[in-house]
């Protein structure tokens, strides 16, 4: 899959013992989404840890083009070509979701 260029996203990159969390927030993304994703980042990292994905390194980028092999090497994470055959996001969160107890009508 590809890096989303219009909305913020969290990406979890995993290869053996080297794990990284990357928050990408494109400048053209809607302001409300930028605020939600920025606020939820710590909670998403904590949930990933609770699910067994221990994050060794975390980073933030604003341009999807920054999410490349060089950047991942700087984070100490595997390059996409070695971990996913050139494809990012095999282990990624698309973003925050509603809690299981809330209905869409109840949250408006």
Image: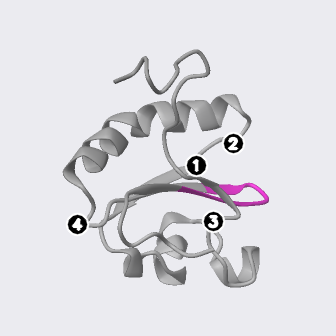
Proximity of marks 1 and 4: CB atoms separated by less than 8 Å: no
Check disc 1 and report the residue beneath it. 56
Can you identify the residue that label 4 sits on? 27
Provide the secondary structure element on which disc 1 rests.
loop
Closer to the camera in the image, 43 or 34: 34
Depth check, mark 1 against mark 4: the one in front is 4
The residue indicated by pointer 3 is: 89
From the top left corner, tell me how far across and down residue 5 is, in percent.
39, 73
Determine which quarter of the picture holds residue 105.
top left
Secondary structure beneath dot 3 equals loop
The N terminus sits in image quarter:
bottom right
The crowd level at tag 4 (other Cα within 10 Å; few <14, some 14-19, many 20+) is some
The spot of residue 43 in percent (x, y) is: 47, 30
Real-space Cα separation, disc 3 to disc 1, in angstroms: 17 Å
**SS state under label 4:** loop
The residue tagged 2 is 53
Alpha carbon separation for disc pair 2 and 4: 28 Å
Residue name at image x 54 percent, y 31 percent: 46
Q: Which residues are magenta?
A: 11-19
Would you place residue 69 above or below residue 30 in this image? below
As drawn, is 32 to the left or to the right of 73?
left
- Disc 2/disc 3 C-alpha distance (Å): 14 Å
Q: Dot 2 surroundings within 10 Å: few (below 14), some, or many (20 or more)?
A: some
On the rendered structure, is 15 left or right of 41? right
In the picture shown, does residue 35 fall above or below 64? above
Who's the residue at 50% across and 80% down the image?
Answer: 68
The alpha-carbon separation of the residues under discs 1 and 4 comes to 26 Å
In this rendering, the answer to whether 72 lies above or below 91 is below
Foreground label between 2 and 3 = 3
């Amino acid at each position: 899959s590809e890096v989303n260029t219009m909305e913020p996203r969290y990406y979890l990159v995993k290869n053996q013992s080297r794990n990284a969390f990357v928050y990408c927030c494109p400048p053209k993304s809607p302001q409300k989404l930028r605020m939600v994703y920025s606020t939820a980042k710590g909670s998403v990292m904590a949930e990933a840890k609770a699910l067994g994905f221990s994050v060794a390194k975390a980073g933030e980028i604003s341009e999807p083009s920054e999410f490349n092999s060089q950047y991942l090497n700087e984070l100490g994470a595997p390059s996409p070509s070695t971990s996913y055959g050139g494809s990012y996001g095999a282990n990624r969160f698309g973003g925050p979701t509603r809690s299981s107890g809330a209905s869409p009508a109840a949250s408006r």
